[in-house]
Each structure stands twice: as structure tokens, then as C-alpha cells.
Image (cartoon, helix red, strand yellow):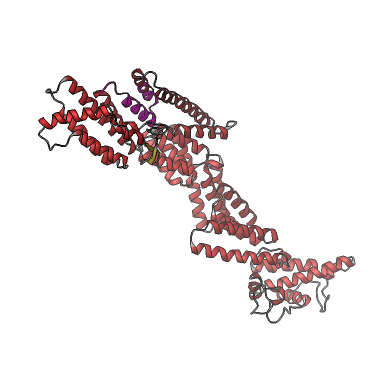
Amino acid sequence: MESPVDSYLTTSSSYLADDEMTTVEDGGSPVVHNQSATESMDQSATVNEEKMNNKMDEESVDDGVGHAEHKDNGNACYLKGDYRGAIAHYTLAIETARSDLNDELTDEETKELKTLLASYYSNRAAAFTMILKHDEAITDCDSAIEHNPDFFKAFTRKAKILTTKGDLDGALKTFSLALVRDPNNAKTIKDKDEVLEVKQRFQNATNLIKKHRDSGGTHPGAQRDAKQALALIEIILSPCRAWKEAMLLKVEALNNLARFEEAYALTTKLIRLGMGNQNTELVLLRAESLFAIGQIDDAITHLRQVIGFDPDHARAKVILRTLRTLAKKKAEGDVAYKARDFEKAMAEYSLALEMCPCPPRESASYRAKVLFNRASSHAALRNHNEVIDDCTEAIQLDNEYTKAYKRRAASLLIIGGKEECEKATRDYEKALKLAKTDEEKEDIEKKIRSAQVQLKRASRKDFYKILGVTRDATDAEIKKSYRKKALKWHPDRHGNSTEEQKKKAEETFRDVNLAYEVLSDPQKKQRYDEGVEEQDLDNPHARPGGHDMGGHGGIDPNVLFQMFMQQQGGMGGMGGSGRNSFHFG
């Protein structure tokens, strides 16, 4: 007869019964203890144990502790969740009972002792399952069946452990053997049917994964199939939580859905569970996950490992060759960037992007990094619209890419304009949420304040926009643009225009000269960039948003223009003095 612990371990997802008091096992699955079963301990088992122990008390030469007492100690440890302690006590019970088997026992006594011994093995198997030692548990179930071939509980327990490991054929066979002993057991019939359903689900999931693999994820409904495959695998892993092959299939399903971080974490778990680095499929899937999250060097190392185990692995060889070339191009871009050869860096990064072997979503993190590097090259060349485009694409691939938000915001502010300033502020606010250090947060907060100042200024006169230059324009570019604008809008060039056109030319000419006066003066330019009001730019004590002392005096636009033209060596056909004294021949 089995002891009380055997009554505790039946199963929906674990091994336990329906009248339940729940605790948690090492692996996180529910463990339910049947309290009523403890109180209604099988009396015949107790009588048999007492009978055998009395006989052994008379004949034994040991310390007097019988196997029944060791079993009781094991049960007590089990109920407290001390499974390793329970295993130790059950082991003592087993050893003591085995030592009591001898030729002096009658056939009936031998049968009774073997029945008890079988229950001890079964109890130890239950404890082994709680610490996820499934192989040891199966061995104990086999020992229990060997000592008591009609031990129904040992068969069902073994079948459930086999199900947990994913040995579905073995589980079905063992359930059938149990049903030979109790053909009408409804619970066992249901458990066997559920294993058949799991087997069918696994086949369906395998077919969906293979379809995705064969088409490269390009067949119609690929995403739907990938989601369905993952859903099936999740259902399968509920009763089969130690099935490594199902977990490996889940890795591929996660990769197919671009959930690469989860896939990589699961490959790590499988290695720890003993699947081993020599499983080429595991290592290959791990390499693909690593590449997708941007770890190309680690991916290459894993691919070399696959080829080391299987030199003819065609898929690994193709991916390795591509990633090596890809890594080389990116490295050449990095070298060119550090050497300040930004045009070459930009070209190399572009080639690397073109060579990515997977659809963008399957190499998202790596592509995002290369796009950001190319954006940095564009920024060095002051191609700010291209910077914004590359950073936008990088953010679409990785919406937590802090550097890309900051880089895009900087270029938006350089382009200027109210809309750009608003976008830049939002980018900095997003980056602030993603920032990890206090120093980084402080820096971003400062940038947000600067962006807000520029946003406020964007609704007023924008001297950079008036001159047609960006905020990172050099002195030479500011001078060149001023000369072009001043010549274009000089009132003398609009003498034959309508009154409305003349008025517009005069106002624009005045704005152009005012813009140049500010932007050509380093101190005024700095105060303007800090957000000081236009009328306070001559005041060194003025602060953003205030008027403080004094006002903006300014220089007569014609005088400024004359001074500028004299510094540039003069312009033919222009001379004289006065408000509109410059003439074009």
C-alpha cells in the first residue's frame, strides 16, 4: 500500500490532487497538498508497517529505527516543503526496508515488505519531481513498479513525469499500462487523452515553424502563423514544462516574432538545463538572436562554434560569411569616422545597411546602431535633414534608443522653426524618461530648457532663418549669406517696383541687416541663442525672458551694409551715403 504522500501528488499541471492546500515548488509550478488524505492514512499500510517492524525489532541488530519511522520523517519534511530532507529520509526508509528483505521472511511477509518498499520509492519520486530531478524520479517509479507490478499510482506518476519531460510516446505507453490495472479510471483516461492532444498541438506548431523557416518568413500570413505557433507552444509547455525540444521550438517562434531578447534568454535557460553547446540548432538560434540584438561579434563566435561541430552546416556557413562581411564594413566605417573622413564613413555604413541579410525587423538593433552611426556622419557634415531621417528610422527599429532621440533633437533645433523646436522638445523628454544616470538626466534637462527657449523664440524673428543659415553656420557662411540677401533686398534694386514691393524690400533689408548685426557679433549671438529678447541684446546683463536695463540700440542698416561692403573690398557701381544711397549700375 502507498503512504500518505502518494495521495498528495496528482495533477493538472503538476502532480497533485483536487482537495488542496497550495504551496510552490522550486520550478514555480503549483504544488497542492491533500490535507484530508493525510488524515485518512491507509490503515492497512500502517498495520503492515507495524507488523513488519515488530518482527524486525526482534531480529534486527541496528539502532532500532525502522523504515516506517524514516518514512514518517520524510512525509513531515515533504509537507514543510523540505524536499531534499524528505529525499534523505525516504532513502533511509528504502535502505532499511531493503536490508530487511531476507530468506527468513515468509512469502506473505516478503510481499508486504515489497509493497511498502514500492511506496517509499514512489514517495521519493514525488520529492525528486519537486526539485526538478525528473530522471531520478522516473528511476524511482521503475523501482516501485519492480517491487509491486500492480502499483497503479507508480504507473500514473511515471506517465506524468514523462509528460513533463516531453516523452509523449513513453507517457502514453505508461498510461496504457496503468489502465490495464484499472481500466475504468476516469482521471487516467482523461490524462492520456490530454497527452494525445499535446502531441497533436506539437505537430501543428512544428509545421507552422517549418513553413516560416522554408519561406524565410515571407509567405502570406507569416506573422499570424508565427503567433499561432507560439500560442500552441505555450499551451504545450504548461503540462510539459521540462520539454527541452518544445522550448527550443519556442526560441525559433520568438525569433520569428522579433522577440529576440526573450529568445536569447530562453537559449541561456536551455544551456543551463543541460541541452549543451553541442546542439547545433540551439547555438544557431542563439547566434541569430545575438545578431538581432546588435551583438554581431558574439553571433559570429557562435556561428563558428556551429561549423566546428558540423563543418557542412550550410545555413550557418552562409550566415557567417555574410556577418563577417557586414562586420568588416561597419568597422571600416568606424575607422573612417574616427579619422574624420565622414564621407567615407557614411558610404561604408550605407553598404553595411544594404548587406543586412535579414528583413529590417529581424536585425532591428544592429540596423539601428548602423543608422545612428551614419546619422552621426551626416551631423558632422551638417546634413541635418539626413540626420533626422536616419535617426527616425533607427527609433522605429528601437524605440528606446536614447542616443537617437538626442541626436535627432539636436538636428531639429539646428534647423529651427516652431514645429522643429516642438519635436525636439518631445525627443528630449522621451530621452529623459530613458536616461539611466543622474548625470545624463541633468544634461538632458538642460537641453530641454534650451529647446523651450528656442521654441519661444521661434514665434518671433528668427535671425538664422532671415539669413537663410542653420544654427551651426560658420562666420564665413553667415557673411556670405548676408551679402547675398543684402544685395537682393537693397532698396535701390527695387526702385521700379510697386509701393507694396518697395515696402517689403525695405523691411526685409532692415531685418537682414539686424540679423547680421547680431549673428556676426559673438557676444550678441550668444545672448540671442540663450533666449535674450531682441531689444536687450546690447545689454550684457540681460537674461532670457527679461528686459533688464537698457535697450537694443542697433546700427542703421545702410551704415552696416556700407561698412560690410568696405570690408569686403567694395562693390562696383555702389557708392554714396545716406539712407538709400547705394546704387546698382
Front residue of 343 and 359: 359
Q: How many marks?
A: 0
Q: Can residue 216 be seen in the rendering of this structure? A: no
Kindly indicate the quadrant of the structure image that contains residue 29: top left
Q: Is 406 drawn above or below residue 550 in the view shown?
A: above
Residue 85: where, in percent of width, then height? 26, 41
Q: Can residue 9 be seen in the rendering of this structure? A: yes
- Residue shown at 26% from the left, 23% from the top: 148
Q: In which quadrant of the rendered image does the N terminus lie?
A: top left
Residue 199: where, in percent of width, then height? 44, 25
Left or right position of 512 against 194: right
Front residue of 283 and 93: 93
Q: Is 188 drawn above or below residue 576 in the view shown?
A: above
Left or right position of 369 against 145: right
Range covered by the magenta-colored residues: 148-174
Kindly indicate the quadrant of the structure image that contains residue 523: bottom right
Residue 467 forms part of the magenta stretch: no
Front residue of 266 and 558: 266
Q: Is 347 drawn above or below residue 170 in the view shown?
A: below
- Residue shown at 33% from the left, 19% from the top: 181
Residue 134: where, in percent of width, then height? 32, 33
Residue 152 forms part of the magenta stretch: yes
Left or right position of 428 against 478: left
Please tell me whether the stretch drawn in magenta is mainly helix, strand or loop: helix
